[in-house]
Image (cartoon, grey):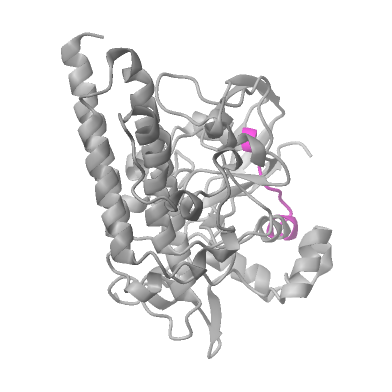
Amino acid sequence: MDTATETVKTVALLAQFIATRGQTEKLCAPLQKEDTVVQPMGDVSPPKWHLAHSTWFFEQFILTRFQKDFKPFHPRYNYLFNSYYESIGERVLRANRGFLTRPTLDEILDYRHHVNKEISAIYDTVGKHDRADFERLIELGIQHEQQHQELLVTDIKYILGNNPIFPPYLQQRENNHVKNPAPKARYLEIEAGMHHIGYHGNGFSWDNELPQHSVFLQDYSISSLPVTNADYIEFMLDGGYEDFRHWLQEGWELVKANHWQAPLHFHKIEGDWYHYTMHGLEKVNPNAPVTHVSFYEADAYATWAGKRLPTEFEWEAATRKYNPDKAHGNFLEDGHLQPQPANYSDEKCSQLLGDVWEWTYSSYHPYPGYKREEGALGEYNGKFMLNQMVLRGGSCATPRSHIRITYRNFFHPDKKWQFSGIRLAEKINP
């Protein structure tokens, strides 16, 4: 690569860095300072913590390595804002992040601006032999912060959605209730054969998407649409949460113990279903994809419907075949922050990318030949590859530039505070 090309690449990466950092702060702009400290459950991190941790990541993995005479912004921030990196040292327990009333939000913003300035300043000081590694870590930090932007949206929604007055995050809008029927889902056939799974190319990917390998799949079909709110409400009205026959045992125990009766954020008001959205409490749009369901709920719905969840390999093979254009998907940049009704096409699967993460019936395990990165960054994915399920496709809170067909998200099967939804599959010849 010649010097001019390197300069263009460096300028573009710096612009992406600045834009990503600004997007995170933009997401926090509608909040009151009090909103940024709250942690209503252990899975949720306070918005102020997200602002600090994503900054700590750049300081810890880039400034400490490439800045001459590095001096931390604050000697205790490593303890406060390390997330789970055992090799870096002790840290505040995840469930205790809401106790951090100090440092203040203003101090955290000062920290962000300081690190932004230092990262920008060292671009010209990194030696040529370190340039490739430096740029790789900058891009990794950008991708890491984009993950936290999605977590930030879902955590803000949980914080405000569990406030009894249901304060809106965004300006109130007209009721989006739609009376027209949704398009009817069709089942699209995928022929048996070998399919390439995993990332292959020169762009960014996480190590859990590697290496690309081949998987043989039997004939199957996959729904052209995700399950809608209307579909799921039919399951609820048919006693879906009262009939153990639909449920895996662990899921049924959670239904009984937690009195599950509906997706997260759903509320029954005067006989109608409402749900908390980023615009406040709204009547449920029957045509939009159902969201905020656990794996157990997704599987129970599939069983009730006489179908099943696709495996992550089936999902990826179908998505490669129909090759959706993510430019037409509903992502963070579109500003809805809520799944939207399908823009239906007879030729393609709809909403494979964007709107809702789709649960698959695949455990989160390493691909054959997986190699964990050396050092602290090797803790990013590899150590979580057990007792979690894979989700695919991105959501309305995922940055558009962050998603790929091969992207593997993962959560424990009981989690439902993310924008998680359902797409069904079935064997062609059962």
The answer, for residue 93, to whether it is visible in the render is yes
> Residue 301 location, x and y as percent?
69, 60
Residue 396 horizontal side relative to residue 240, left or right: left
Residue placed furthest toward the bottom: 270
Q: Residue at x 27, y 37 (%)?
A: 119
- Above or below, comparing residue 364 to residue 35 in the picture: above
Horizontal placement of 107 versus 209: left or right?
left
Q: Nearer the viewer, residue 430 or 400?
A: 400
Q: Residue at x 50, y 43 (%)?
A: 393
Which quadrant of the rendered structure holds the N terminus? top left
Q: Residue furthest left?
A: 4
Instruction: Report the number of discs.
Output: 0
**x%, y% of residue 428?**
71, 37
The quarter of the rendered structure image containing the C terminus is top right
The x, y position of residue 385, in whole percent, is: 68, 38
Where is residue 87 drawn, in percent x and y? 59, 37
Asked if residue 310 is among those painted magenta in the image, a careful observer would answer yes
Which portion, as a residue range, is magenta? 301-313
- Front residue (pair 189, 228): 228
Residue 329 shows up from this direction? no
Say whether residue 309 is left or right of residue 318: right
What's the residue at 45%, 35% (across, down)? Answer: 404
Find out whether residue 158 is within the magenta segment: no
